[in-house]
Amino acid sequence: MAVRFKKALLLLLFSMGSGVLLAAYSLLPAPANLLFSFAAVIIGIFFFRKFSAVRDRILFFVFALLFFFLTIVVITTVQYVKENPIEATEARLAIQKDM
């Protein structure tokens, strides 16, 4: 049981790292994004050396894509909320300024 749990945690850790790095690659400008791409490739190579089963490799890609899309959605949502604040928040800030 402990071996399977450790294997699952490593799979999630590697795929999360790779997904987040790929999300940073897609959001950053040209010179900086190459470092994130290179780091994601290194994580992938390390994972493929450690886990040789086809099932584990497929799960790595699926979870990396899932974390990639999840990170993109979260970052985009945060940017949208920062640029377009909610009206209730603006009203509360105006009330606080009046006090």
Image: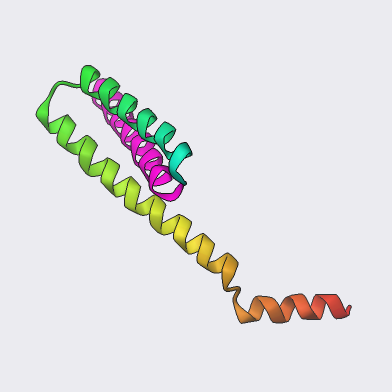
Residue 26 in the image: above or below residue 96: above
| Residue sitting at the far front | 31
Seen at 30% across and 29% down, the residue is: 41
Q: Residue 13 colored magenta?
A: yes
The magenta stretch is 1-28
Name the outermost residue toward the top. Answer: 49
Residue 2 makes an appearance in the image: no
Height in image: 31 above or below 49? Answer: below
In depth, the one of 2 and 99 nearer the eye is 99
Q: Position of residue 30 (x, y in %)?
A: 43, 43
Q: Quadrant of residue 84?
A: bottom right
Residue at the image position 73 percent from the left and 78 percent from the top: 92
Which of the image's four quarters has the C terminus? bottom right
Quadrant holding the N terminus: top left
Q: Nearer the viewer, residue 35 or 30?
A: 30
Q: How is the image coloured?
A: rainbow
**Main SS type for the magenta part?**
helix
Residue 32 % position (x, y):
48, 38
Asked if the magenta segment contains residue 14, the reply would be yes
Inspect this view and state whether residue 42 appears.
Answer: yes
86 sits left or right of 21 in the view: right
Residue at point 62%, 81% (across, down): 87
Quadrant of the image occupied by residue 12: top left
Count all numbered tags in the image, as a single digit: 0
Q: Please state which of residues 23 and 29 is positioned toward the viewer in this rendering.
A: 29
Quadrant in the rendering for residue 24: top left
Which residue appears farthest toward the left when viewing the image? 54
Query: Which residue lies at the image location 36% right of the left edge and 29% below the top edge?
Result: 38
